[in-house]
Image (cartoon, coloured by chain):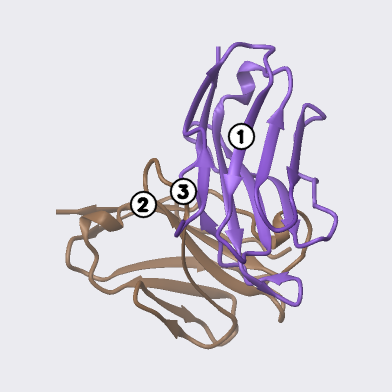
Chain colours: A purple, B brown
Amino acid sequence: GAGVSQSPSNKVTEKGKDVELRCDPISGHTALYWYRQRLGQGLEFLIYFQGNSAPDKSGLPSDRFSAERTGESVSTLTIQRTQQEDSAVYLCASSPGTSGVSTGELFFGEGSRLTVL
Amino acid sequence: DAKTTQPPSMDCAEGRAANLPCNHSTISGNEYVYWYRQIHSQGPQYIIHGLKNNETNEMASLIITEDRKSSTLILPHATLRDTAVYYCIVRVAGRGGADGLTFGKGTHLIIQP
């Protein structure tokens, strides 16, 4: 596809359930980012993948959150035992890079809207 | 990290140039200035970035002062579709979390018909 694809676009779940959110980056982009945006709030960084380097997990809010990326392809963000405070839009972005450094030009997907009842 | 200061909101008449200011008085020599925007209910969109020279692309122009302590994003002929939150970010690749790409509160630009 031409852009970053995220699925599902909308997810409603019950408190305590686990959810998986998927991101398909633009082909060839070495960097991949996850952000969270609560209603009416700014973007909150979660995790950053760059090539085969260890991911920067410094933004993950708790150990209920984890993310994986297969090589320079698909990424999955997993939230275990969801809480109502996890309700937000989860945004994925990818970016090209050279020599293992992102250009900083992020291409965002449309996001996955998570609602925890 | 250098932080940025932007006005929380601005209005501009349709068809006029929209000039969005950003202060980054503590910027260091290797930090780039990036601009993104987020239209309601969409993911953010990259606009432009620069180091010290002025930059122009099909979307906008970026004017950086000689001392690099502030910059202005210019949308030359604003349309209603330019209504969005505009984020000014200063960045060094690999710096801290988010690879240096930390989004603040931005400026909510409202284009008036």
Task: Examine the rendered structure and indicate whether residue A115 appears above or below residue B42.
Answer: above
Disc 3 to disc 1: CB gap under 8 Å: no
Q: Which residue is mark 3?
A: B43
Q: Which residue is mark 1?
A: A21
List x then y, in percent, for residue A52: 81, 61
- Element at label 3: loop
Disc 2 to disc 1: CB gap under 8 Å: no
Mark 3 chain: B
Q: Marks 2/3: CA distance? A: 11 Å
Q: Marks 3/1: CA distance? A: 16 Å
Mark number displayed over residue B84: 2
- Element at label 1: strand
Q: Marks 2/1: CA distance? A: 26 Å
Task: Examine the rendered structure and indicate whether residue A80 appears above or below residue B24.
Answer: above
Q: Residue at x 44, y 73 (%)?
A: B72
- Classify the position of the C terminus of chain B by image quarter: bottom left
Mark 2 chain: B
Amino acid type indicated by mark 2? Ala
Q: Residues within 10 Å of mark 2 (few under 14, many from 20)?
A: many
List x then y, in percent, for residue B14: 18, 61
